[in-house]
Amino acid sequence: MELKEAQKHVDDWIKSTGVRYFNELTNMAILTEEVGELASIFARKYGEQSFKEGESADVADEMADVLFVLICLANQTGVDLEEALLKNIDKKSNRDASRHKENPKLK
């Protein structure tokens, strides 16, 4: 699925099932919460914390939650994520053309 399709799919779901978008500030808070849940899984799975009894370790599901809310925010604010991502990659390509190759920490 392309990002434009994903944005339309989420918008259709919101309008048919979600009733309406939460306001932007609420969605920003939800995005922060979802990123925190993803961070908890990483801390337990790849870091030094241990899982609590019955705690889920579904990285893919948590990443999808983050993406869903990010798409909601993009839809609400008129951001074309596909266009934004391409511009961002171009910016990074120009800015970091040799930066990472010359970084001794990455060798």
Image (cartoon, grey):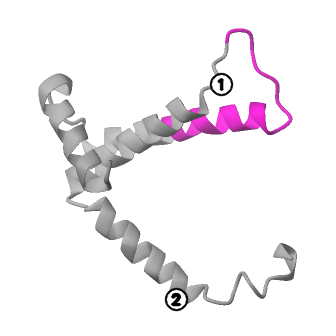
Q: Position of residue 15 (x, y in %)?
A: 13, 32
Total marks in image: 2
On screen, residue 66 versus residue 74, left or right, reads right
Which type of secondary structure does the marked residue at label 1 adopt? loop
Name the residue at 64% across, 39% down: 39
Name the residue at 22% across, 40% down: 9
- The answer to whether the residues at label 2 and label 1 have Cβ atoms under 8 Å apart is no
Measured in 3D between alpha carbons, the distance from the residue under mark 2 to the one under mark 1, in whole angstroms, is 37 Å
Q: 11 or 78, which lies in front?
A: 11
On screen, residue 24 versus residue 69, left or right, reads left
Is 53 within the magenta? yes
Residue type, numbered disc 1: Ala
Which type of secondary structure does the marked residue at label 2 adopt? helix
Q: Residues within 10 Å of mark 2 (few under 14, many from 20)?
A: few
Q: For the C terminus, give its image quadrant.
A: bottom right
Precedes in sequence: disc 2 or disc 1: 1
Q: Which residues are magenta?
A: 33-54
On screen, residue 106 versus residue 42, left or right, reads right
Write down the residue under mark 1: 57
Q: Position of residue 97 (x, y in %)?
A: 61, 88
Write down the residue under mark 2: 94
Choose top left, top right, bottom left or bottom right for residue 57.
top right
Task: Decide: is 74 above or below 48.
Answer: below
Q: Residues within 10 Å of mark 1 (few under 14, many from 20)?
A: some
| Residue farthest toward the front in the current orientation of the protein | 1
Residue type, numbered disc 2: Asn
Choose top left, top right, bottom left or bottom right for residue 55.
top right
